[in-house]
Amino acid sequence: MMKNDIPAPLPLEPDCLPHLQKPVVLGLSGGRDSVALLHLLVQQGCSVRALHVHHGIRAAEADADAAFCARLCHELEVPFELQRVDVPTLATEQGVSLETAGRHARRWLLAAAARRCKGGVVALAHHADDQAETVLFRLARGAAGLRGMQPVHEASGIIWVRPMLSWRRSEITDWLQQMGQSWRDDSTNAVADVARNALRLEALPALNKALGRDVTPILGRSARLHAETIDALEAALAALPTRDPQGRLYLPFVWQQPLALQKAIVRHYLQEHSVADISEEMVLAIVDILPAEAATSRVNLPGDRQAIRRERRLVISPA
């Protein structure tokens, strides 16, 4: 089968479809997932451009990945952009792992490319198996993992979409093989030396064996159900009289609520103000300063901001 004879794909996430009418920036690594999504976006008639990030790791293998992506985009007549980043240096400067530094760099470059498109969205090629890994990873870190990744979410003024979130990795492989499309395999993904690789290569197979079933769709269903519960909670919070006319958090109402609801209100308020890396520790620290008799009235936040209690109001201000 020729690459132009594309077999019928599995359906895309319905919530993503309206956003795919806008200019789309695709993070194209050259791996099977992003290659499949590139074909899907072209098949959908999207106005898509591809961005490949060269991390300055894996030497000749990374150069070959970039060349492969450039050739594929030329074949499909898709605009292609190559960005080079010295991820090892970034990791050292930021005091984080190579994986984390690379992820931050990719997201920043993708967001910047979407802004240049004036209203563009970013498409990511995560699928159902990635969702299962994400749920386990977040649970193991004590984070709010059950919600998992969402088909559509907004961050820093950019819409991020995951149109293939219901696809399985095996389905993506079969689909590409049917059309005779190759892809690039990152050799580092086959080594269980980082947490996500270990989850994919060791933990999930062990869970499948222990439970005698494929746990990936079960974890995906749990993520969806939890997301629905969180969405309902956020809708209920938005209807509560927690704001004054200036949009500040109105503390006399918050003081009357049980601790669990106070925490939910504070978290929702931080999310509305695009505070990054919200943790339970951050939320509890802010809850502690809400009472008028509290010893301190401010908490430092990421991005050189502070949560400050001013009389009977809480505001988010520059530090």
Image (cartoon, grey):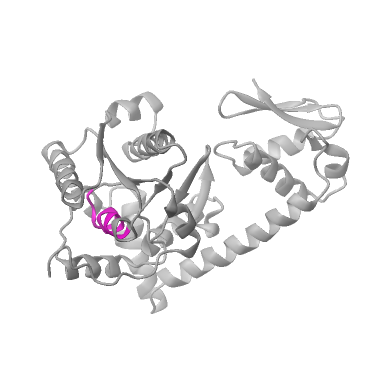
- Magenta-span inclusion, residue 36: yes
> From where the camera sits, is residue 306 visible?
yes
Main SS of the magenta part reads: helix
- In the figure, 212 relative to 231: above or below? below
Q: Residue at x 82, y 30 (%)?
A: 294
Corner quadrant of residue 225: bottom right
Give the answer, above or below, for where 159 lies relative to 205.
above
Is 137 colored magenta in this rendering?
no
In this view, the residue in front, 63 or 281, is: 63
Position of the N terminus, as image quadrant, is bottom left
Quarter of the image for the C terminus: give it: top right
- In this view, 256 is above or below 175: above
Image point (75%, 39%), residue name: 287
Find residue 145 and report its horizontal and vertical position in percent.
52, 55
Q: Which residues are magenta?
A: 30-40
Q: How many marks?
A: 0
Is there any visible trace of residue 149 in the rendered image?
no
- Residue 94, given in percent of the width and then of the height, sits at 40, 27
Residue toward you, 316 or 66: 66
> Could you say where residue 265 lies in the image, as x and y percent from the top left?
74, 46
Q: From the viewer's perspective, tell me whether residue 290 is left or right of residue 66.
A: right
Task: Give the image location of residue 303, x and y in percent.
Answer: 56, 27
Work out whether residue 96 or residue 81 is closer to the camera in this orientation and state it.
81
- Extreme-top residue of the structure: 319
Q: What residue appears at the point 31 percent right and 36 percent down from the top-left corner?
A: 98
